[in-house]
Image (cartoon, rainbow, N blue to C red):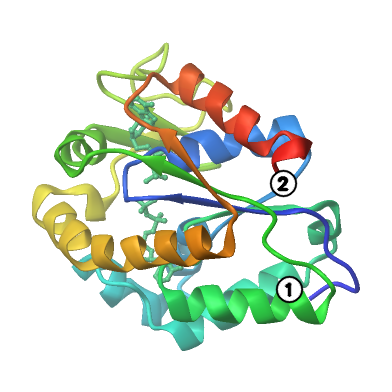
Amino acid sequence: MTASIGRVVVLLGAPGAGKGTQAQILSEKLGLAHVATGDLFRAAVRDETPLGVTAKGYMDRGELVPDAVTIEMLLERLAKPDAEKGILLDGFPRNTAQAEVLDKALADKGGRVDVAPYIEVPEADLVGRLGGRWICRAAGHPYHEQTKPPVTPGICDADGSELYQRTDDQPATVQARLQQQLGALDLVVDYYRTKGVLKVVDGRQGIDLVTGDLLAALAPANG
Ligand code: ADP
Ligand code: ADP
């Protein structure tokens, strides 16, 4: 952990709800560091680090990577200097054990989770979101075949890098991810509701409308 920590926002949502899409927009608008545990794991897998070798099997099966390695990776990331400007967490915490560790780590630095917006999308919509998803190699910018196609097929609008489909977005793994992860997400949502920081946003709307609702939820008066 850095000596101090700025505002902490936890973006919640099921796989495919739009966390990555919105986190990239919001982190830029609000000047927060975007910390996505899925992106950190994918970089480790690509670089074949020991962490990546451990994580790969779990990711391929659509399971959560064990808490011990996930939490260590997250705390190392939060120790980087850019966390001082505040952080937008995307994909962490994914169970209540992770939520408790995060609270404790933040409390040690005099910080706390300020607001936890939950992008709510019905399970029936998630399969189509994930099946049509393409992301860029350079920075993980997400696109969708129907709802957000790139200007030039196969190329990222933002940085010109190649688009690819994640292996865990294949139908069989999507089913496994939803089956294994949605129950834990419900408990995390309840955790932040009890703490009084949860803000539910309707994620069935178009991307721009969801962004608007999230910005309203994140306005200073709202935490
Ligand atoms: P999505 O945004 O589609 O839900 P992510 O990119 O966030 O997917 O995560 C991809 C995979 O990385 C997850 O299915 C899981 O295996 C692993 N992962 C990411 N974040 C966590 C976490 N906080 N705890 C455990 N595993 C995680
Ligand atoms: P997550 O990080 O929660 O797994 P993503 O941001 O990667 O979700 O979005 C999943 C897929 O759905 C992507 O293909 C993305 O382009 C698309 N998408 C994101 N938000 C919306 C939305 N509001 N409406 C329609 N499609 C969306």
Q: Residue at x 38, y 28 (%)?
A: 143
Depth order, front residue of 189/143? 189
Residue at the outermost right position = 3
Provide residue 154's location: percent of width, then percent of height: 35, 25
Q: How crowded is mark 2: few (under 14 residues within 10 Å), some or many (20 or more)?
A: some
In the rendered view, does 130 fall on the left or right side of 68? left
Residue at the outermost left position = 172
Q: Which mark is residue 223?
A: 2
Distance, label 1 to label 2, CA atoms, is 16 Å
Task: Say which quarter of the image contains residue 31.
Answer: top right
Quadrant the N terminus occupies: bottom right
Provide residue 42's location: percent of width, then percent of height: 44, 60
What element does badge 1 sit on? helix
Depth order, front residue of 61/93? 93
User: Does the rendering let one see residue 137?
Assistant: no
Q: Which amino acid does label 1 sit on?
A: Leu
Tell me which image quadrant ligand 2 sits in.
top left
In the rendered view, does 170 fall on the left or right side of 202? left
What element does badge 2 sit on? loop
Does label 1 or label 2 sit earlier along the sequence? 1
Provide residue 46's location: percent of width, then percent of height: 45, 63
> Mark 1 = which residue?
106
Q: Which amino acid does label 2 sit on?
A: Gly
The reply to whether the residue tagged 1 has its Cβ within 8 angstroms of ligand 1 is no
